[in-house]
């Protein structure tokens, strides 16, 4: 609307003074007839692939979905379809659900780190006028947890509390004051137990472990999960050409989404539970609710509200969701529970505090002959996604580089802290940071350019990693080349004055996890989408994909609109209710675009076929000759010969009424057979490379990241606007972790900063200039070639900044976040060691190329040619990790080299020499000690 | 409820009449004399578009215009806004027609999860009311009290600048570069 628009007062006209129509007075003509736009829009050839006769460049070759491109929306900068709800305040988040007669719920939380709950006296609370229901753990004894293998949570403490803030009881009252008052009147008698706050202590045997797993318990420690993996030949790592060894410490970080958790539970008049919750994964909450409340799943309707940010932090089924349901059942009235910001930190599920040790070796040709990772991660009070995180810390480091050998020991321990869980870049972020910094360090030692070192060691497209992950499309090389060019790297690296630096980092992440954790992938698909079209021509799409702001609803609407050649406005996505949406695993592990869009395409293709059949019958033209474009179907040889979409629709409805189609997506069989082979397995992987430029104030230790060139290979950007938003947003979140964010625990083990004042999320002033660069490698199995863009882009920013800091001041700091105090302490230490009086005299690193540089350049230029051929499927020979080291890709490496090992358990002579996390293997499981059977 | 402290919450403070003009409509509600503006707007007036992100002035989600000035409603006593004219996110649009700032946030990716959006819209509207031609630096200073975890702010700044350009009459409200949203009902002959 133009700026001087005024609605004519009292006018009955449906036209505004600026000539546009008055909303609500729109006449909606049948869309097939052209609506109020009688002319069919022309085909947008800019968005039709060149191999289909359009103008869209396809450097990565053709895709099987190309022939369904109609130039409607895919590849166009598309505002989110729900953006208008968000800018008008109409979007309804958890706390915005207000039901008649509602009660306010409050949760009573533990003040102790670890204590046995001896008794709970609720009588005073119950006697308080206005209190309608009170509940304790005795009301819900069933355990739940996000992973079926590690169910260790209760709605409220059943026997013990495991961290400060753990749930003990809950109340529902007529208003917030009364509810808070009642909560404070509940008297709990605790027997305080010894608590564990340091992950290293979690490895030791104790009298009273935080959880007890019976025969599978490891010793009497707090080890929740341990992992050992060894691949390749490690016999001659000792005499490597260059090596890196670094001990890293990462603090825990929280998702920091702006919407605190909130839930509304209501048992309707038929006795079914209607639960409104901002969930990323409504289906897991659904399952857990059924278990805890002991009602069948079909008696529960989980309604996903708008989600005010998730980032992994809203993907567990949560105890407060159970509490609300229990209270509502007792009270017979709806109950709403909304968290204070502090409570958000008590449920946490953020990134694990980690101790990571990394060792890398390179041979004299600059090949990475060995990668050793030891990761001890602090899980807090519950298992959450930890089983998976324990694997991800290792296995997601096995690409994009070709490795001579890989050795990983990981352990996750329970401690008396709020639980850690999945957070954007799940499990991959911390080791990735250490690994990329290690590469930088090795490049320095070998006197080569770190970008060239990377370019000479990349796995090609259509290859296999050392642990057997199937890499399909791979845009790593282009990503590195583009950021090098964009940032003017060659002019800046190791050439800038003290205090200014530039650094590189790469990333690799899964695009959906290969196995659905609740069922056998052969029995049930990963994602299902239903489409329904009735007489009016509007397309209703039912999906369980949870839009958490990343734009999944938009992506699903886009692909349907694209296939059917309909304006986006005609496509309505219904994804809020479990009653109407097909079962879906929800928004985690960056699976939604890949899996749901694929399912949506397959459903849309079904509809498309029905429409084409009808059109072909009316027009007596074979359907191969027909083209769909903007609400019309016509003969491609004679566009005048055609019918409207609506006519075709009505024809195909003749016998059956509404057109209905269901589409599903299932991953192809893949991966190795060793224990843990499924962890990290994905139908496709994303790749990214960032260059960051920083300024370091050497006198204060303050780091400012000024510019970032961020290249991310997302296969195909269905919606470049959203992909860029994800890249910049990921940068922001990663930058927080590397520069300022940390959950600080004090000497007494208490979390000291559970609020947004002291938990420092970067504000607009801390944000660098980010130049997003989209790389399209066209994944053969992705929807129109797309892969994920939501999590992978976070990984490279951390190492890029750490490496840039080294370039600026010549100091590597292995402890995140790089707060000014730490940086200054490191500077002061170096000054003392090297006898430098003034910080402004610090030496900065410089680079003199060795001969190896030439070799690397040559190798990478050969590889570049190889990659192009493989990407375009002109070279389809098998390729496995190891070919770079002379292995034959057609024969398993273990058959070619006697020293090549694949092992998932340490040999007895290895056990004593494993790293910190590896020491978990010195403990014996109860069942082998004759313990509980 | 962590810790031993016990500060009784009830009986609540005595109720008082609170009246103000909210989004152009006179409102009169009964609320506790110590209520904060955020609670009154959300719970009594029904402006659920005003968001609570932290309750302590750190996120900016709760911003509203009080007599044209952006204020954090979680740090404002409702009684202090008694008799004022208040604009929330619900009051920015002209009926069903979005204000340029709203349209631009939608079109340029200024809103992802959208929870921070009401606060950003309010602060940036206040900025544009005063300064129709702000520099990026000035925009950044205006929104420094608003936290966004999704967008990394860059597309927010672009949205605000796009809206400023429209307000100045320099550009029309147009969808971004390629027209992904063909309007099926534009004006014109039917
Ligand atoms: S709720 Fe007011 S600033 Fe966060
Ligand atoms: S859009 Fe999600 S917090 Fe800003």
Image: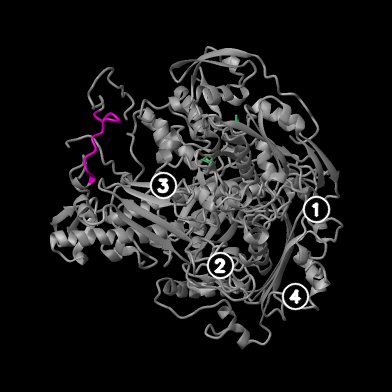
Which residue, given by chain and number where applicable, does mark 3 sit on? Answer: A574
Which of the pair A850/A891 is nearer the observer?
A891
Which is in the foreground here, disc 3 or disc 2?
A: 3
Which residue, given by chain and number where applicable, does mark 2 sit on? Answer: A681
Q: Can residue A162 be seen in this view?
A: yes
**Quick one: label 1 or label 3, which is nearer the N terminus?**
1
Which residue, given by chain and number where applicable, does mark 4 sit on? Answer: A906
The Cα–Cα distance between marks 1 and 3, rounded to whole angstroms, is 46 Å
Which quadrant would the C terminus of chain A be assigned to in this image? bottom right
The Cα–Cα distance between marks 4 and 1, rounded to whole angstroms, is 25 Å
**Quick one: label 4 or label 3, which is nearer the N terminus?**
3
Could you tell me which chain the residue with mark 2 belongs to? A
Which of the pair A866/A908 is nearer the observer?
A908
- Residue at 64% across, 57% down: A385
Give the magenta part as a residue range.
A19-31
Residue A207's x, y, as percent? 87, 57
């Amino acid at each position: 609307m133009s700026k001087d628009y005024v609605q004519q007062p009292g006018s009955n006209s449906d036209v505004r003074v600026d000539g546009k129509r008055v909303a609500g007075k729109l006449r909606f003509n049948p869309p097939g007839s052209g609506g109020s736009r009688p002319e069919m829009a022309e085909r947008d050839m800019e968005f039709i692939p060149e191999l289909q006769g359009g103008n869209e460049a396809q450097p990565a070759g053709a895709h099987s979905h190309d022939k369904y491109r109609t130039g409607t929306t895919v590849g166009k900068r598309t505002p989110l379809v729900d953006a208008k709800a968000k800018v008008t305040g109409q979007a309804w988040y958890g706390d915005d659900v207000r039901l008649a007669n509602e009660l306010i719920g409050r949760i009573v939380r533990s003040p102790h780190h670890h204590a046995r709950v001896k008794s709970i006296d609720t009588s005073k609370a119950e006697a308080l006028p206005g209190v309608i229901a009170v509940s304790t753990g005795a009301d819900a004894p069933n355990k739940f947890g996000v992973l079926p293998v590690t169910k260790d949570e209760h709605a409220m403490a059943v026997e013990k509390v495991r961290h400060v803030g753990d749930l003990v009881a809950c109340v529902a009252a007529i208003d917030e004051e009364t509810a808070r008052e009642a909560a404070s009147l509940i008297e709990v008698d605790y027997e305080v137990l010894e608590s564990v706050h340091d992950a290293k202590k979690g490895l030791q045997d104790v009298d009273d472990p935080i959880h007890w797993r019976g025969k599978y318990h490891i010793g009497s420690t707090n080890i929740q999960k341990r992992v050992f993996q060894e691949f390749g030949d490690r016999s001659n790592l000792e005499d490597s050409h260059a090596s890196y060894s670094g001990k890293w410490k990462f603090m825990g970080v929280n998702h920091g989404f702006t919407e605190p958790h909130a839930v509304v539970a209501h048992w309707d008049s038929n006795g079914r539970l209607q639960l409104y919750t901002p969930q990323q994964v409504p289906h897991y909450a659904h399952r857990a609710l059924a278990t805890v409340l002991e009602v069948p799943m079909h008696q529960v309707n989980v309604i996903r509200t708008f989600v005010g940010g998730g980032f992994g932090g809203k993907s567990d089924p949560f105890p407060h969701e159970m509490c609300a349901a229990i209270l509502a059942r007792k009270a017979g009235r709806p109950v709403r529970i909304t968290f204070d910001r502090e409570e958000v930190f008590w449920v946490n599920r953020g990134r694990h505090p980690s101790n990571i040790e990394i060792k890398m070796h390179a041979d004299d040709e600059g090949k990475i002959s060995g990668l050793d990772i030891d990761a001890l991660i602090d899980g807090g009070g519950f298992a959450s996604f930890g089983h998976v995180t324990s694997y991800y810390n290792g296995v997601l480091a096995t690409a994009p580089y070709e490795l001579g050998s890989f050795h990983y020991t990981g352990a996750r321990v329970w401690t008396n802290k709020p639980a850690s869980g999945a957070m954007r870049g799940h499990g991959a972020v911390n080791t990735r940071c250490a690994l990329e910094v290690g590469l930088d360090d090795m490049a320095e030692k070998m006197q080569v350019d770190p970008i060239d070192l990377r370019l000479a060691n990349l796995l090609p497209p259509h290859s296999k990693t050392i642990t057997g992950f199937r890499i399909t499309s791979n845009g790593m090389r282009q990503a590195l080349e583009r950021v090098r060019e964009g940032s003017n790297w060659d002019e800046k690296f190791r050439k800038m004055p003290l205090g200014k630096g530039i650094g590189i980092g790469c990333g690799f992440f899964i695009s959906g996890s290969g196995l659905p954790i609740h069922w056998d992938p052969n029995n049930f698909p990963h994602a299902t989408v239903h489409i329904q079209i009735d007489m009016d021509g509007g397309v209703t799409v039912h999906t369980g994909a949870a839009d958490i702001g990343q734009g999944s609803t938009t992506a699903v609407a886009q692909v349907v609109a694209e296939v059917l050649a309909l304006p986006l406005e005609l496509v309505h996505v219904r994804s809020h209710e479990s009653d109407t949406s097909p079962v879906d695993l929800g928004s985690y592990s960056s699976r939604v675009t890949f899996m749901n869009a694929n399912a949506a395409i397959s459903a849309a293709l079904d509809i498309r076929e029905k429409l084409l059949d009808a059109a072909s019958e009316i027009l007596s033209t074979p359907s191969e000759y027909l083209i769909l474009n903007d609400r019309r179907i016509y003969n491609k040889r004679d566009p005048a010969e055609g019918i409207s979409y609506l006519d075709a629709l009505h024809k195909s409805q003749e016998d059956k009424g509404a057109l209905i189609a269901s589409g599903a997506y299932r991953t192809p069989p893949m991966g190795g057979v060793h224990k843990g082979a499924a962890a990290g397995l994905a139908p496709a992987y994303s790749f990214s490379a960032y260059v960051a430029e920083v300024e370091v104030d050497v006198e204060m230790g303050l780091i400012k990241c000024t510019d970032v060139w961020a290249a991310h290979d997302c296969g195909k950007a269905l919606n470049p606007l959203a992909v860029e938003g994800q890249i910049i947003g990921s940068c922001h979140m990663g930058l927080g972790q590397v520069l300022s964010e940390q959950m600080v625990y004090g000497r007494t083990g208490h979390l000291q900063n559970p609020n947004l004042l002291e938990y420092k999320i970067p504000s607009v002033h801390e944000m660098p200039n980010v130049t997003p660069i989209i790389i399209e490698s066209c994944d053969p199995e992705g929807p129109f070639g797309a892969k994920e863009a939501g999590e992978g882009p976070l990984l490279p920013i951390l190492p890029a900044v750490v490496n840039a800091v080294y370039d600026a001041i010549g100091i590597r700091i292995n402890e995140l976040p790089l707060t000014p105090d730490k940086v200054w302490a490191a500077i002061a230490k170096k000054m003392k060691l090297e006898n430098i009086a003034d910080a402004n005299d610090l030496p900065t690193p410089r680079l003199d190329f060795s001969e190896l540089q030439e070799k690397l350049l040559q190798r990478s230029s050969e590889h570049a040619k190889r990659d192009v051929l493989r990407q375009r499927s002109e070279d389809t020979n098998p390729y496995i990790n190891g070919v770079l080291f002379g292995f034959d890709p057609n024969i398993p490496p273990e058959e070619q080299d006697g020293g090549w090992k694949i092992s998932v358990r340490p040999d007895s002579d290895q056990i004593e020499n494993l790293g910190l996390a590896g020491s978990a293997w010195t403990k014996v499981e109860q069942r082998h000690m004759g313990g509980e059977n | 409820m962590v810790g031993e402290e016990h500060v009784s919450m009830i009986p609540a403070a005595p109720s008082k009449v609170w009246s103000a003009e909210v989004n152009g409509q006179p409102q009169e509600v009964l609320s506790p004399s110590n209520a904060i503006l955020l609670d009154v707007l959300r719970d009594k007036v029904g402006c659920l578009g005003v968001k609570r992100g932290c309750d302590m002035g750190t996120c900016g989600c709760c911003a509203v215009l009080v007599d044209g000035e952006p204020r954090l409603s979680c740090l404002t006593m409702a009684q202090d806004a008694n008799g004022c004219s208040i604009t929330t996110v619900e009051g920015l649009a002209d009926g069903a027609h979005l204000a340029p700032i709203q349209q631009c946030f939608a079109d340029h990716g200024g809103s992802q999860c959208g929870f921070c959006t009401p606060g950003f819209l309010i602060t940036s509207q206040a900025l544009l009311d005063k300064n129709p031609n702000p520099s990026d630096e000035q925009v950044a200073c205006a929104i420094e009290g608003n936290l966004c975890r999704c967008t990394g702010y860059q597309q927010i700044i672009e949205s605000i600048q796009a809206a400023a350009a429209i307000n100045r009459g320099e550009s029309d409200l147009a969808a971004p570069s390629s027209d992904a949203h063909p309007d099926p009902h534009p004006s014109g002959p039917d």
